[in-house]
Image (tube, rainbow, N blue to C red):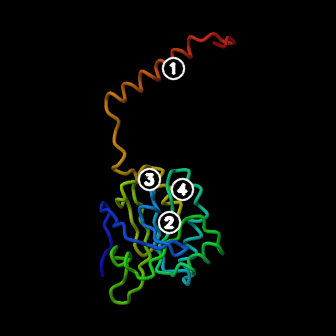
């Protein structure tokens, strides 16, 4: 059995379907943010649905940290749409009914063809920052990981020395103007 994609690798941008049956992609789901990607068995699995609901309840906390949540299953789009509507899931549910993306990512059991429940945190560069296969961590643990900077992507370059110096002098000038202003006098 494949161990799935390793930490540090970039997850392939395989085509998926949204809940309306239109083609989408991992890059579109992620945008320019950190992505918490849940791979679940499908709407027919009570365990998978409970896990989605746990992350549904933490959606705003992830959003405040600049992260998105998305979930992928082998469900057909109408099943995912029903789950999203019925359970009030506020994040994207993507479908891979042909299991092409799931196979490419190494998330199918070769013996049975069943989806291996997984969680990935992808940095802005789509590189895998952490992963969990099988037993998934809870939403609070993933929030803590992101909050502590574990999902910082390589795409955010450090500002140059000149940019840092320019920022320093701009802040210093603003502080001096603030210190020299006369209270109660508007200029």
Vertical comparison of 141 with 160: above or below: below
Vertical comparison of 121 with 114: above or below: above
Q: Mark 4 and mark 3: span between their CA atoms? A: 14 Å
Q: Are marks 3 and 1 in contact (CB under 8 Å)?
A: no
- Residue at 66%, 75% in the rendered image: 86
Q: Considering the numbered disc 4 on the image, is that residue within a helix, a strand or a loop?
A: helix
**Sequence-first disc among 2 and 1:** 2
Q: Mark 2 and mark 3: span between their CA atoms? A: 14 Å
Mark 3: give few (<14), some (14-19) or many (20+) Cα within 10 Å: some
Mark 1: give few (<14), some (14-19) or many (20+) Cα within 10 Å: few
Name the outermost residue toward the right.
184
**Sequence-first disc among 2 and 3:** 3
Q: Are marks 1 and 4 in contact (CB under 8 Å)?
A: no
Residue bearing the label numbered 4 = 62
**Sequence-first disc among 2 and 4:** 4
Question: Which of label 4 and label 3 is nearer to you?
Answer: 3
x, y percent for residue 31: 45, 56
Question: Which of label 2 and label 3 is nearer to you?
Answer: 3
- Residue at 55%, 54% in the rendered image: 63
Q: Are marks 2 and 3 in contact (CB under 8 Å)?
A: no
Question: Which of label 3 and label 1 is nearer to you?
Answer: 3
Q: Considering the numbered disc 2 on the image, is that residue within a helix, a strand or a loop?
A: strand
Q: Considering the numbered disc 3 on the image, is that residue within a helix, a strand or a loop?
A: loop
Residue bearing the label numbered 2 = 70
Residue bearing the label numbered 1 = 174
Mark 4: give few (<14), some (14-19) or many (20+) Cα within 10 Å: many
Name the outermost residue toward the bottom.
112
| Residue placed most toward the observer, 147 or 72 | 72
Quarter placement of the N terminus: bottom left
Q: Of the numbered discs in the image, which one, if any, rests on residue 32?
A: 3
x, y percent for residue 80: 56, 77
- Residue at 63%, 12% in the rendered image: 187
């Amino acid at each position: 059995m494949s161990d799935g994609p390793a930490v540090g690798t970039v997850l392939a941008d395989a085509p998926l379907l949204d809940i309306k049956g239109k083609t989408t992609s991992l890059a579109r789901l992620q945008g320019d943010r950190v992505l918490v990607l849940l791979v679940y068995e499908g709407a027919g699995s009570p365990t998978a649905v409970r896990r989605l609901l746990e992350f549904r309840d933490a959606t705003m906390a992830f959003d405040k940290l600049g992260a998105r949540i998305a979930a992928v299953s082998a469900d057909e789009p109408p099943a995912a749409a029903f789950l999203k509507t019925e359970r009030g899931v506020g994040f994207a549910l993507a479908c891979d009914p042909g299991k092409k993306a799931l196979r490419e990512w190494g998330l199918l059991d070769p013996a049975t063809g069943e989806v291996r429940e997984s969680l990935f945190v992808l940095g802005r560069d789509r590189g895998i920052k952490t992963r969990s296969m099988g037993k998934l961590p809870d939403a609070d643990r993933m929030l803590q990981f992101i909050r502590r900077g574990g999902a910082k992507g390589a795409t955010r370059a450090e500002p140059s020395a000149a940019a840092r110096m320019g920022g320093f002098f701009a802040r210093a000038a603003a502080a001096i103007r603030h210190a020299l202003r006369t209270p109660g006098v508007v200029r």
